[in-house]
Image (cartoon, rainbow, N blue to C red):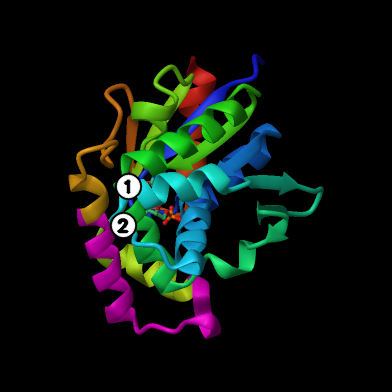
Amino acid sequence: MKQLLITIDGPAGSGKTTVSRLLAEKLSYIYVDTGALYRGVALAVQKSGISSGSDDELGKLCKTLDLKFVQSKTKTCLILDGNDISHLIRTPEISMLASAISARPVVREYLLKIQRDMGKKKGTVFEGRDMGTIVFPDADFKFFLDACPEIRALRRYNELKDKNTQTLEEIEKDIRLRDKNDSTRKIAPLKPAEQAVIINSTSISAAQVVSQMMSFIEKK
Ligand code: C5P
């Protein structure tokens, strides 16, 4: 089969990461979590102490960053300026900061190039918020994954288990706030691409979502 570029967009906790990983595994593709890139920039902003609202300062910072994924046989690491930051980007503070800086055009421009460069290699599943609408409008297959906020919060809560620093209620509040920020921003808002297949995963498992996706892919 021809090597495809597949996009999966959707809100926080909709199961994109699990589903993208499973789908990539099934097809022997590479999987790219673009949310991690926004989290990487957020970490750099936090460390530098600059204002997340200043395009000027964000632009200058982005110019100095060296942000990339490094893939080994067992895992994918996010590397910022030579250091593995994968374990530092999953905090509630970084989630909210990533959502704030993702609304800034300079940050999106900086990450657009990185993502499109990675997309030159077909046989990839990209997950994010604007993969099908902005970054890869010509993708071979576009999916939009959704689920109700309560279930998304519960999944996040269960995922983090003993690493949780937030209650279930706090996680749901943050998710709802990020949904609002991500879907109402002027630039690249979270929404399904016109040709996207929309799948609601509220009452089905990740494996069932993947099998629905596979049947769309195999039909074409
Ligand atoms: O997917 P994840 O929750 O890790 O993404 C963190 C934040 O990065 C999102 O809330 C969103 O604001 C931003 N993001 C984005 N566009 C993407 C991926 C993530 O704006 N393609």
Question: Residue 170's image quarter?
Answer: bottom left
Q: Nearer the viewer, residue 75 or 209?
A: 75
Visible residue check, residue 102 = no
Vertical relation: 75 (above or below) 130: below
- In x, y percent, where is residue 181? 23, 54
Instruction: Please tell me which residue is depicted at 35% across the width and 84% down the height of the picture.
Output: 167
Q: Secondary structure at mark 2?
A: helix
Q: Secondary structure at mark 1?
A: helix
In this figure, which residue is indicated by the disc labeled 1? 55
Q: Nearer the viewer, residue 48 or 192?
A: 48
Q: Amino acid at mark 1?
A: Asp
Q: Which residues, given as a range, are shown in magenta?
A: 159-180
Q: Amino acid at mark 2?
A: Ala
Q: Nearer the viewer, residue 180 or 158?
A: 180
- In x, y percent, where is residue 128? 43, 43
Instruction: Please tell me which residue is depicted at 42% across the width and 28% down the height of the picture.
Output: 135
Is 180 displayed left or right of 23 in the figure? left
Visible residue check, residue 72 = yes
Q: Is mark 2 within 8 Å of ligand 1?
A: yes
In this figure, which residue is indicated by the disc labeled 2? 100
Contact between labelled residues 2 and 1, with CB atoms less than 8 Å apart: no
State the CA–CA distance, disc 1 to disc 2. 12 Å
